[in-house]
Image (cartoon, rainbow, N blue to C red):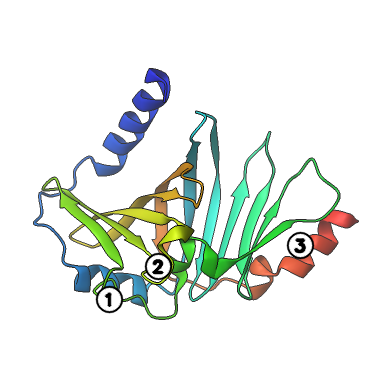
Amino acid sequence: MSKRILSIIAAVALTLYAGAASAQQLSLSQISAYLNQLQTAQGGFTQINEDGTLYTGQIYIKRPGRIRFEYNAPSESMVLASGGQLAIFDARSNTGPERYPLNQTPLSIILAPNVDLERARMVTDVSSDGTTTSVTAQDPDNPNYGSIQMVFTANPVELRQWVVTDDLGVETTVILNDLVAGGSLRDILFNIRAETRNRSN
């Protein structure tokens, strides 16, 4: 990863964590409880791919099982999860989205109906720098699906970023900003068929 990208990550992280009170390491039960009560949320995100490319956009979460990434121009792509599927819409393609089973991706850990990070063999690493707590988790029955490293702050507990490592070892970092929990999100936002129809018109 280039020094430029590392400097961008550092700058964004400092902005996100500035002013955060020093806190003890969060427990796995505290983090599980936070994710389970996080029914809806929306905000901005910055995505950093392993090749150094950087994208921004808006994220919408409606647990369980639904998430929407709207990428800003020039990408204008989209990623949707609902109905047990993850769909990737490429703005340059007119052949419909690429689809994958959601439960075969690390994002399913965050979107599960009941998050239990204390489950045996689910968490592979926990660390804290006094301000943030990082937790790396995987599907304990299918570790070959990849893993997700989540970063949380405390007081109040908030999800700040994650790094997904897929089944091929490719890392994708998503830094969240101004994530607001609560509120009503329409189901149509996560409807893969509706989005496919809209893009075919």
Instruction: Look at the numbered disc 3 and give the secondary structure of its residue.
Output: helix
Q: Horizontally, is 72 left or right of 184 in the view?
A: right
Q: Residues within 10 Å of mark 1 (few under 14, many from 20)?
A: few
Comparing 14 with 36, the one in front is 36
Q: Which residue is drawn at 42% across and 21% down?
A: 2
Q: Horizontally, is 193 left or right of 141 in the view?
A: right
Residue 119, numbered label: 1
Instruction: Look at the numbered disc 1 and give the secondary structure of its residue.
Output: loop
Q: Residues within 10 Å of mark 2 (few under 14, many from 20)?
A: many
Counting residues from the start of the chain, the first of labels 1 and 2 encountered is 1
Residue 50 drawn at (x, y percent): 48, 34
Counting residues from the start of the chain, the first of labels 3 and 1 encountered is 1
Q: Residue at x 70, y 70 (%)?
A: 191
In which quadrant will I find the C terminus?
Answer: bottom right
In the picture as drawn, the residue positioned furthest to the right comes out as 201
In which quadrant will I find the N terminus?
Answer: top left
Residue 19 drawn at (x, y percent): 19, 43
Q: Residues within 10 Å of mark 3 (few under 14, many from 20)?
A: some
Q: Name the residue under label 3.
A: 195
User: Quarter of the image holding residue 18?
Assistant: top left
Q: Name the residue under label 2.
A: 139
Q: Horizontally, is 133 left or right of 167 in the view?
A: left
Closer to the camera: disc 2 or disc 3? Answer: 2
Q: What residue type is labelled 1?
A: Arg
Q: Report the Cα–Cα distance between label 3 and label 1.
A: 35 Å
Residue 200 drawn at (x, y percent): 88, 56
Q: What residue type is labelled 2?
A: Asp
Comparing 27 with 142, the one in front is 142
Q: How many discs mark residues in the rendered view?
A: 3
Closer to the camera: disc 3 or disc 1? Answer: 1
